[in-house]
Amino acid sequence: MTKLEKEEILDHEISELIIPSQKVAIVQEGNTLEHALLVLIKSGYSAIPVLDRDYKLKGLVSTTLILDSILGLEKIEYDNLSAHKVEEVMDTKVARIMENGIFFKALELSINHPFLCVVNEEGVFTGILTRKSILAIIHRHLKH
Ligand code: AMP
């Protein structure tokens, strides 16, 4: 690959790859685990972003985290689904990138994360960037 071709990939705008927040399945930190599990199952995704009332990114919640939190010693405590909130089980370590971030940073983060959350200067969630879309861009460039 020439230097120019490499630069062409790395200069790629991430903005055009972003799935906007309106199209992303999300939950709020104050939602019950029951609600979050329903959203996860209905959306078909295993992990989705958690936001606060102001749409700020707070974490990620997954089916595994929820199910793990209701596992008792000998049985599943289904009642805990309605008694506990998303904020109690969510993972607050979220792979995030600014909406004006650079492609190389997105590529680097996507090695360990199937999707990245995109935020603006105020930490407001504006969408996601999937590993799939990043790989598709690289594939498109390498094909030629
Ligand atoms: P994909 O590349 O489409 O397989 O998506 C990878 C991951 O990104 C999924 O497993 C979800 O965790 C997340 N994701 C993708 N699209 C959405 C969406 N519309 N709403 C919520 N999460 C999504």
Image (spheres, rainbow, N blue to C red):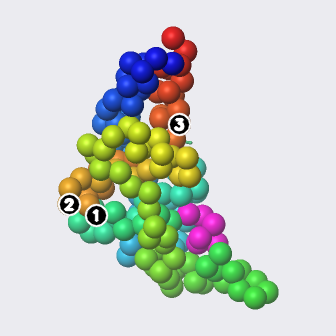
Element on which disc 3 rests: helix
Residue 67 percent coordinates (x, y): 64, 72
Amino acid bearing label 3: Lys
Q: Ligand 1 near label 3 (Cβ, under 8 Å)? A: yes
Q: Residue furthest left?
A: 122
Mark 3 or 1, nearer chain start: 1
Amino acid bearing label 1: Lys
- Left or right: residue 21 versus residue 6 is left
**Quick check: is 63 in the magenta stretch?**
yes
Q: Residue furthest top?
A: 144
Mark 3 or 2, nearer chain start: 2
Q: At 44% across and 57% down in the image, what residue appears?
A: 95
Give the CA separation, mark 3 to mark 2: 27 Å
Q: Ligand 1 near label 2 (Cβ, under 8 Å)? A: no
Mark 3 or mark 1, which is nearer to you? 3
In the displayed structure, would residue 16 be above or below residue 32? above
Contact (Cβ within 8 Å) of mark 1 with mark 2: yes
Q: At 30% across and 36% down in the image, what residue appears?
A: 15
Pointer 1 residue: 56
Pointer 3 residue: 132
Element on which disc 2 rests: loop
Per the rendered image, the range of residues in magenta is 62-67
Q: At 53% across and 52% down in the image, what residue appears?
A: 113
**Quick check: is 21 in the magenta stretch?**
no
Residue 44 percent coordinates (x, y): 57, 50
Depth check: give the residue in front, 56 or 27: 56
